[in-house]
Amino acid sequence: MAVSANGLSTLAVLRGQPGGGLAAPVQIASGEGPMIGTEVPLDLAVADFNGDGHPDAAVLNGNGATYSVAILRGQGDGSLAAPLLHHVSWWPSHMAVADFDGDGKPDLMLDALAYAGGGLRLLHNTTPDLAQVQPSSGTLAPVFSGGTPDYVLQLPASGPAPTLTPWLAFGTASVSIGGVPVASGSASAPIAVPAEGSVTVTVNVQARDGSTRGYIFTIGRPVPATATASPAAGGTASCTPDPVPFGGSAACTATPAMGYQFTGWTGACMGQGAACTLGHVEAAQASVALFAPHAYAVTATASPVAGGMASCAPSPVAHGGSATCTATASTGYQFTGWTGACAGQGAHCTLGGLTEEKASAALFAQKTTLALPEGPQAQKPLGLLLQAGAGWQMADAGTQTAASVGAALPAGVTLPHGVVRLRLEQGTQGSQATVVLTYPQALPQGAVYYKYGKTADGPQPHWYPFPGAAISGSTVTLTLQDGGAGDDDRMENGVIVDPGGVALLAAAPAGAQAIPTLGAWALALLAGLLGLFGLWGYGAGRDAVFLRKIRPKPLWGKR
């Protein structure tokens, strides 16, 4: 008779006597031997599990944390061999023995508690599985499971040679580690592992029906993962961790120094970016981060393209280096300045101490020289400059006498230098264009610029003082608006038509009473009113006109 002793982790065997009685009980540890009392026997079953004709005992043990089935093989003389433990993970409380799979061998059916998944679990008598393999040191990955064949055992950097202790899932199979038989629950011989390398050990399990299963354990100690910079001044490179636990991962990083850029790796990190990941490291890994001096592009463009050429040399430029940019105007154009990096410099621009890319645009103004058509400076040169911007191009430019316009000037207004005729095209619709006129001599004080054409309040062509003109010395700067002030066609169509010229207003006679100075528009309005109504008026100041009673004709006269 076999009886499990609850609370003592023992199995008591009471042998039958010829007279029908039982001998004194013999206690055998049924759990984690040789200690008694570490587990509580929960259930007991008897069957010939190994097929040798002797009844064996199966004891279900548990202590609230670990559970196992112990197979105690009968020896045929009433004694039992030491238990072979098979760990189970589902917290069973009962078991039953029968030939559940119909192969003629007794199997065990165990229940499982609800929080362990519930249901029933079958331990086949012929399954060549391991319930557990316990290394003496290190970390096993993944956690052991009988259905997983491959494992990595990460050892510390130093320490004794490890051992492996297998636990059978059923007690009738045999185990060998590295070809050497090992009893279930017993440690293997120490396994030699090189300091920076690994070994592979195979654990084989063979059931009594001949079926087998193999488990492969790759065992290694930490291996170095290193990174260096080339050239050393180009930056830094490192890997973390170093060394790497066997089978683990390392992250390597390349950081360029000021003035350098990362260009790639050689070695283990080849093909990856500045942040490199090395996975499943089982041997020493070395990488070299490559750095090169920064090279910055230095570029220049021409605006407009037809206006000239602009270039920079050298390009690219090493970190901290310098480059010279040059602007060369085409025939009919004049360099007027830069935008971008060269802004404020002349046609030869120097950029030094470069730490980033630089771009500049050379601005060219279209220019031409006309001849004044009349007056004291007739046939002398008149410079005309169309400043770059908004795509404007000079399509036509010329001069003509004021009389050739075919419309009488307002009374008291003269155009001593004639009229400048200008047509601009290809500009952005609705944008402004800037034109600079340079006369042979300084223009007199009080000069204004008159234009001929349509205005917002005058749909018929007429002479009017142009407010978009700025006169300084010998130059007149005109700001013309496509479709607006200064554009005779009054349409936003990318075309500006601009006839006009410098005007002088008649001077006031000596002794005339002065009135407050009026602007050019006010003067024009006043002159028109006086002409209509024949009023008397007086003028003073540099832009004023001395007025007398006007007869009904557009000329100045005496009373």
Image (cartoon, rainbow, N blue to C red):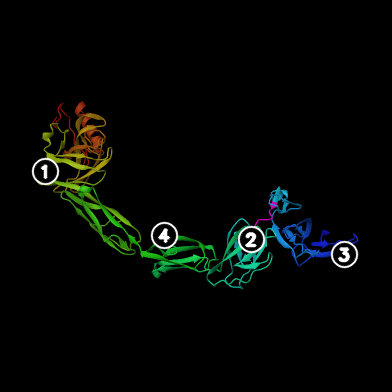
Q: Earlier in the sequence, mark 3 or mark 2?
A: 3
Q: Which mark is residue 24?
A: 3
**Boundaries of the magenta span:** 122-129
- Amino acid carrying label 4: it is Gly
Q: For the residue labelled by badge 2, is the local secondary structure a helix, a strand or a loop?
A: strand
1 vs 4, front mark: 4
Which residue is denoted by mark 2 in the rendering?
Answer: 206
Q: At which x and y percent is residue 506?
A: 16, 38
Residue 53's quadrant in the figure?
bottom right
Judging depth in this view, the residue of 309 and 409 nearest the camera is 309
Q: CA distance from mark 1 to mark 4?
A: 72 Å
**Closer to the camera, 367 or 316?**
316
Q: Amino acid at mark 1?
A: Leu
Q: Which residue is mark 1?
A: 372
Residue at (11% x, 43% y) in the render = 372
Residue occupied by mark 4: 271
Cα gap from disc 3 to disc 4, whole angstroms: 76 Å
User: Which one is closest to the eye, mark 3 or mark 1?
Assistant: 3
Q: What amino acid is found at the position of numbered circle 2 in the picture? A: Gln
Distance between the alpha carbons at the discs numbered 3 and 2: 38 Å
Question: Taking the image as drawn, is residue 258 in sight?
Answer: no
Among the two numbered marks 3 and 4 on one chain, the one whose residue lies closer to the N terminus: 3
Residues at discs 3 and 1 in contact (Cβ within 8 Å) = no
- Quarter the C terminus occupies: top left
**CB within 8 Å, label 3 to label 4:** no
Mark 3 vs mark 4: give the one in front: 3
